[in-house]
Image: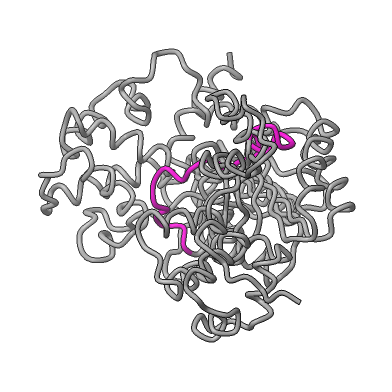
Amino acid sequence: MRGARSPSEDDYRPAGSVSSALRKIRAGPGTRPDTVTGEGIMKAATATTRQPATFGEVLRTHRRRAGMTQQQVADLATLSVRAVRDLESGRARRPRRATVQLLGDVLRLSGGSRAAFEAAADPLPQPGHGGEVDWLPPVSPTPLIGRERELRALSDLLTFERHRRVCVVGIPGVGKTRLALEVATTLRDREGWSVLWRDASDVPDGGSLAESAECVLAGRGAEDTLLVVDGARGTAAAEAAGRLLDRFPRLRVVTTAQVPGQGDGAHLMPVGPLPVPGGPDGRGDDAAGCPSVRLFRTHLRRLRPHQTLGVETSAAVAALCRWLDGVPARLVDAASWCLLQSPEELLRAMTEAEDPERFAFPPTDPDGLPDPLALALADVGSRERELLARLAALPGGWTVDEAVLLSGTTTRHTAGLLHALLLRGLLRTADEEGTDRFRVLNRLRPLLVAAGGRTAA
């Protein structure tokens, strides 16, 4: 009986390489003459092509090159030998990023080899494989600022609390999509989940969404998967989620929407504006650490890297954050004006302008675009809009009891209206002296006045 052959360098060359084709051509007697031509070489190479190597194959190749056993790799990487064996065999297909980095350290990989090793652990879907390219999540454009608590809460809902369907709701521009993207990235990197992403506007109905998702999910086996449906409206996302959750027990679904669905079984998570500085001058450490101020300053530094944040500039930034209600998209858009003028000049221009609303959008936006907040207000019922108009007339924050007195109705009726408005993000909380108080968004006030004028006319 012949002994086992020691692996040679050729064993680790890609099967579809031209060198392997040449070895086949040199195989000996019986080789066809035309195979030594360029056409023959390409035919042989094409015949030996295969799909890109899996992570298990790449791991096994590097382990053997290092002359290590599975047990040695497991010990050095503080893993079980079964974990290494499952990775190499393909039974565990999506290792956690920390595990991949540990294995790369143990195998002493660097440079291009290290990059290829880590890429194999989370490969991009190949074109033509069930349309998976259409389900890739977008790339995070900027770091997430000021949403640490919301990120932790949403992650916990999906993991520790085992909620399978969560709907993130809030006004346009409040950061629902950005939060969902950060959670998806965190669960992929920390927990090894698979992530699918779909813009609801690309799907005509719930049946189409469910059918296309089923094709992708069926090929992923029994692995934890998060499906994000961004910008859901109507019942399409709820119909698709119900169908998919019944079929795939390890699937979780997160939807983002402006309006919460009624009775669709989703756990609602409202996302409100970022906290704003409370003092009139915006000075001190509290203002500097305020999430809305941190976000505005981040974009201010990008546009004006030499800007010094003195007392007057800090006060102007704090006032801008308060006027913009701490809504992230509006903060970023207003900061874009700082390429043209300083925060102090911007604040002065806003207070003196006949139409200060134009500063809540980038200077590059064409005139005549609808205000997303006005569209959100238009979706509100007449009773909620009437209560909003009354509350907007109050100079400061107010409690639920004060809102009941102002509305002239029962506590239960008023609380129901306030609950609906808070879910839609049209009110913001204002913690004053340990008491929960609320405010109407500043930018809603002129819209409510205009709406009242049209109603009176």
The percent position of residue 155, horizontal first and vertical second, equals: 60, 63
The percent position of residue 451, horizontal first and vertical second, equals: 55, 23
162 vs 107, nearest the viewer: 107
Tally of numbered discs? 0
Quarter holding the C terminus is top right
Q: How is the image coloured?
A: one colour
Where 361 falls versus 415 (above or below)? Answer: above
- Does residue 360 appear anywhere in the picture? yes
Looking at the rendering, which quadrant does residue 105 occupy? bottom left
Q: In the image, what residue occupies the spot 47% across and 49% down? A: 273
Residue 191 is covered by the magenta coloring = no
Quarter holding the N terminus is bottom right
The percent position of residue 46, horizontal first and vertical second, equals: 63, 33
165 vs 203, nearest the viewer: 203
Where 371 falls versus 97 (above or below)? Answer: above
364 vs 302, nearest the viewer: 302
- Does residue 383 appear anywhere in the picture? no
Where 23 falls versus 205 (above or below)? Answer: below
Residue 143 is covered by the magenta coloring = yes
Q: In the image, what residue occupies the spot 25% across and 30% down? A: 337
Looking at the rendering, which quadrant does residue 30 occupy? top right
Magenta span covers which residues? 127-148
Where 86 falls versus 237 (above or below)? Answer: below
Image side of residue 332 versus residue 253, left or right: left
The percent position of residue 102, horizontal first and vertical second, equals: 47, 73
Most prominent secondary structure in the magenta stretch?
Answer: loop
Q: In the image, what residue occupies the spot 70% across and 48% down? A: 227
Q: In the image, what residue occupies the spot 74% across and 36% down? A: 130
Image side of residue 100 versus residue 91, left or right: left
224 vs 402, nearest the viewer: 224
